[in-house]
Image (tube, grey):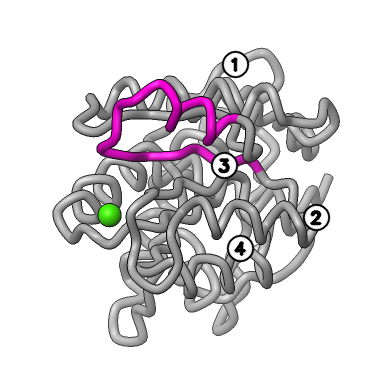
Amino acid sequence: MKILLVEDEAKTVTFLKKGLSENGFVLDVAQDGETGLHLATELSYDLVILDVLLPERDGWDVLQKLRERDRNMPVLFLTARDSVPDRVRGLKAGADDYLVKPFAFSELLARIWTILRRNAKRDNEFLRFAGLEMDLLRRTVFRDTKRLDLTAKEFLLLELFLQHPQEVLSRTFIAERVWDMNFDSDTNTVDVAVRRLRKKADDPFPQKLIHTIRGMGYILEDRS
Ligand code: CA
């Protein structure tokens, strides 16, 4: 799940970046409205978290332009203003929800999941391969009938494999998608994470699904 955060306050950005990535989201950040609008127009996100008071272009304007461009990705407004007319204005302008600062992270998270559930198309909620079934909204993974207890990073890693079955994924590709950064010098992180994932997703089962392709990377493949 990929979220765009449009927010100019460094403190809030740091706080949300940490919290959301710990919960398995991939986050892009724009620190002004113009950049936010550009990213939301050019790329695809499961959710946009949008501050109202922003440099260059305010949140109202970003939302209006997004809707004019027929970008119907869900938008959650974050704002310090707490007046009823502002809330009404936000929802009328096409925001999916509205959260007033300061807020508890747990409340933000609950609202994010509510919006994502509401907007999810049935077919997109699950990723399946061989005996694996990942429920993206409930954040659960089963292999056959056994539930796998994965950390947020392991979940993201398996999600990436499930999105690219039977494709060789390089360590760099995995590092960029799962950690949102480039580990040119430290692809060992990827190897360690894959090993941990295998321990849970492959080791207890006779049929192995995650394979090493020497010198290239990893592949999710059913070799039975
Ligand atoms: Ca602001």
Place residue 119 in its image quadrant: top right
Measured as percent of width and height from the top left, residue 193 is found at 38, 54
Task: Identify the amino acid type marked 1.
Answer: Lys
Place residue 116 in its image quadrant: top right
Q: Which residue is mark 3?
A: 75
Please say whether residue 85 is one of the residues in the magenta stretch. yes
Quadrant of the image where one finds ligand 1: bottom left
Viewer-proximal residue among 175 and 190: 175
Query: Distance of mark 2 from mark 3, alpha carbons?
Result: 13 Å
Q: Which mark is residue 146?
A: 1
Viewer-proximal residue among 47 and 129: 47
Could you classify mark 2 by the number of other residues whose Cα lies within 10 Å: few (under 14), some (14-19), or many (20 or more)? few
Mark 3 and mark 1 residues within 8 Å of each other at the beta carbon: no
Magenta residue span: 74-91
* Mark 2 or mark 3: whose residue is earlier in sequence: 2
Q: Which residue is mark 2?
A: 70
Above or below, comparing residue 184 to residue 193 in the picture: below
Viewer-proximal residue among 122 and 49: 49
* Mark 3 or mark 1: whose residue is earlier in sequence: 3
Judged from the image, the secondary structure of the residue bearing numbered disc 4 is helix
Judged from the image, the secondary structure of the residue bearing numbered disc 1 is strand
Place residue 121 in its image quadrant: top right
Query: Distance of mark 4 from mark 2, alpha carbons?
Result: 11 Å
